[in-house]
Image (tube, helix red, strand yellow):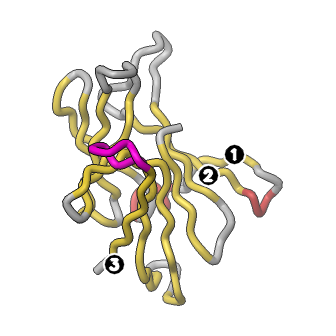
């Protein structure tokens, strides 16, 4: 798993992981595999629905080079992410730049207050991870507009 998203008032968790091909290499045309862990339904693993994938929780990707990809959520394109293989551990990690800080993303929490299925009232999102410059845990809040 690369990172996950949790939101309220729902306990289900969106998981984002590397998408490998049968040969064990990352799928360059679709490097991220995403799905639900449905804690409200006994922890069942379930793929995103078409609507969730295309309009809410899906991720679009663009190849930068063999070991780096630009990512963005289909529902919020103002938060560019980078999937990159690090020399230090030879593993892929997801990064975001927030408030002049580069963060290795571990989780995102989305606060929703009302709204509707098609237009939820998202108050804010909190990105939690590791500050790339200090290697310390960090949480940064962003107000989504």
Note whether residue 137 is visible. yes
Q: Nearer the viewer, mark 2 or mark 3?
A: 3
Q: Residue at x 30, y 43 (%)?
A: 132
Q: Quadrant of the C terminus?
A: bottom left
In the picture, measured across the screen, residue 131 lies left or right of residue 100, that is right
Residue 1: x and y, percent?
Answer: 53, 37
Per the model, the C-alpha gap separating discs 3 and 1 is 30 Å
Secondary element at image label 1: strand
Mark 3 and 1 residues: CB-CB less than 8 Å, in contact? no
The residue indicated by pointer 3 is 143
What mark, if any, has residue 10 been given in the picture?
none
Q: Residue at x 55, y 56 (%)?
A: 49
**Outermost residue to the right:** 42
Where 106 falls versus 83 (above or below)?
Answer: below
For marks 3 and 1, the one nearer the N-term is: 1
Q: Main secondary structure of the magenta part?
A: loop
In the picture, measured across the screen, residue 79 lies left or right of residue 13, that is left
In this picture, which residue range is highlighted in magenta?
130-136
Name the residue nearer the viewer: 105 or 62: 105
For marks 1 and 2, the one nearer the N-term is: 2
Residue 92: x and y, percent?
Answer: 38, 29
Name the residue nearer the viewer: 106 or 11: 106
Q: Residue at x 41, y 57 (%)?
A: 138
Quarter-of-image position of residue 64: top left
The residue indicated by pointer 2 is 36
Q: Residues within 10 Å of mark 2 (few under 14, many from 20)?
A: some
For marks 2 and 3, the one nearer the N-term is: 2
Mark 1 and 2 residues: CB-CB less than 8 Å, in contact? yes
The residue indicated by pointer 1 is 45
Note whether residue 119 is visible. no
In the picture, measured across the screen, residue 127 lies left or right of residue 61, that is right
């Amino acid at each position: 798993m690369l990172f996950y998203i949790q939101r309220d008032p729902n306990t289900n968790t969106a998981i984002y992981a590397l998408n490998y091909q049968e040969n064990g290499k990352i799928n360059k045309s679709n490097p991220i595999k995403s799905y639900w862990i449905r804690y409200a339904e006994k922890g069942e693993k379930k793929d995103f629905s078409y609507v969730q994938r295309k309009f809410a929780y899906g991720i679009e990707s663009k190849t930068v080079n063999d070991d780096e990809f630009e990512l963005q959520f289909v529902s919020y394109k103002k938060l560019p992410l980078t999937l990159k293989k690090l020399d230090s551990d030879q593993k892929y990690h997801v990064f975001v730049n927030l408030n002049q800080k580069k963060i290795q993303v571990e989780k995102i929490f989305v606060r929703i207050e009302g709204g509707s299925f098609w237009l939820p009232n998202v108050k804010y999102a909190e990105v939690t991870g590791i500050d790339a410059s200090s290697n310390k845990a960090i949480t940064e809040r962003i107000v989504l507009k």
